[in-house]
Image (cartoon, grey):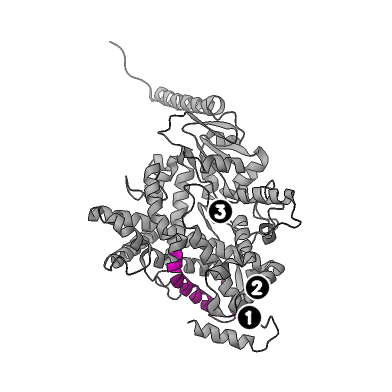
Amino acid sequence: MFNLDIHPVAISYAVVGIIASYFLAVVSYRLLLHPLSRYPGPFLAKLSDAYPGFYAFRRRLHLTTQRDHQKYGPVMRHGPNKLVFNSVQALRDIYQNEKVTKADAYLVSQAAPNVFNLFNAIDRDLHRIKRKLVGAAVSERAMRTFEPTLSNQVDVFVKQLLSPPDAPINMTERSKRLGLDIVGHLSFGYDLRLQTEETNRFLVNAIQLGNYRSNLNMQFPFIHKAHLHNAIGRFFYPSWDEFTRLLQTMIGTRLSQDKDAQPDFYSYVSDALAAESEEARQLDLWTEAMFFTIAGGDTTAAAIAAAFFYLSRNPECYRKLAQEVRTTFKSSSEVRGGPALSSCHYLRACVDESLRMSPPTPSTPWRQLAPDEKDDFLIIDGYPIPKGVSFGVNIYSLHHNEKYFPDPYRFSPERWLPPVPDTPESRAAQKIMRDAFSPFSVGARSCAGKPVAYLETSLTLAKTLWHLDFELAPGVLRQVGAGRKGGESGRERPEEFQLFDQFTSAHDGPYLMFKPRGDFVGQDETKGVIMRNLVFIF
């Protein structure tokens, strides 16, 4: 007979030895044998997704990625199985490639198993179907029908900038309320009234917390694999439950109406959903509505707030834009979409430069070689990338790459205007700059809401500047939204609007003071005319 009595200390040593051997094997493989072992990058990033996960937790992963690119070059390993690029060629090779699909990391945002929306549809065929449906609702043609509703909401925004009078206004708060009010009408013809009432303003915080949670799960897959996301999610439940209840109310209200009662998202997708069962129809509407609300309401608000930030700190740019708007439109009723708004080239340049410096989605859109592709690797910017690896181009880092954008931290709308002097060299430099500009991504999975974003941002700036003048708030409020000299790395630039990366971006400020615009052409009655127009449009 064998003696099976084993001392507890011996068992403990054995367990520790097994665990240590396992971790030693994993570390050795990731450092020496992994297909990405030859790529440069932070040492800790080669070992664990905890590296990007830590900076995602701090909401500064975009700044860390930019810093690491400056240290390690245009391609680097930013996780055991992740490569991040910072070049125009990589942008083309990844996002304009039919063999590429979204990375599995996006599946963490699913509302339920086997339920997908446009954001997390990994399957390429399913994505094409959903993109066609959603794209129809936010196309330029659809925007022409929806514009009166959008314009009315912008009018409310402008009026609210004078309420209360002579008070500092936080443009992040106001732009987020505007964005969500517009997307409420655009999705299900629902009046959320965030601009004028308190009731639904919890949406702003609910969306921000939801994005933060999703970003943590995406950047640190261990959270999802270990089923820790449910425990973490408990911290977000109260506001998220309110959000889902409101979505159900929006959907239920819209379903009680005729499909053509409103020029909204539902009117475009209702026929396609008619063949589905009632349960599937409701589920598809719910998950698309969640994506539509988050994407449409949150991202455009960042563009608007950033534009106000940069204009308030660059007086000459402010002057040029105000002059363009006030000479192009002779009355407030003329300030609308169409050829006149499109002719405001400096306005578009200011919007593009704001999107470049402070992209609403400053992170890395992750991609992978589609699992059903026969190829075992893909060439990206000259590098062979094996199947199973996640890769992408970090938008914030690309937009601040000096190779494409000289003096990248300077707000310069002129860089988007025809070059002076107009030479083959200057035209070539501007072309590659435009190729590197990617606030909405590029290719088949680029943002379908691009027409909405440009119309909303341009119209908001134009209407505001036609009616009002603004300047930075006094005192400590002047610095809200700006970097601080001597602050943490990446946030020490006072001239840069500060973003907090949570896949989309969180931000605060700027605080501005508004007043009816003065007489910029020398007519004493201008102020009275503007006040009458402000009353008239409401």
Q: What mark, if any, has residue 439 been given in the picture? A: 3
Report helix, strand or loop for mark 1: loop
Q: Looking at this rendering, what residue extends furthest in the top direction?
A: 1
Quarter of the image that includes the N terminus: top left
Q: Which class describes the residues within 10 Å of circle 1: few (<14), some (14-19), or many (20+)?
A: some
Decide whether the magenta segment is chiefly helix, strand or loop: helix
Q: Return the mark for residue 322.
A: 2
Report the front residue among 374 and 61.
374
Q: Secondary structure at mark 3?
A: loop
Mark in front: 2 vs 1: 2
- As measured in the structure, the alpha-carbon distance from the residue carrying label 2 to the one carrying label 1 is 10 Å
Give the residue displayed 56% in from the left and 65% down from the top: 304
Secondary structure of residue under mark 2: helix
Per the model, the C-alpha gap separating discs 3 and 1 is 32 Å
**Residue 169 in which image quadrant:** bottom right
Amino acid on which the number 1 mark rests in the picture: Arg
Q: Quadrant of residue 413?
A: bottom right
Q: Out of 52 and 138, give the one closest to the viewer.
A: 138
Q: Amino acid at mark 2?
A: Ala
Q: Residue 481 at what x, y percent from top left?
A: 61, 63
Q: Which residues fall within the magenta stretch? A: 142-169
- In the picture, the disc for residue 517 is 1
| Mark 2 or 1, nearer chain start | 2
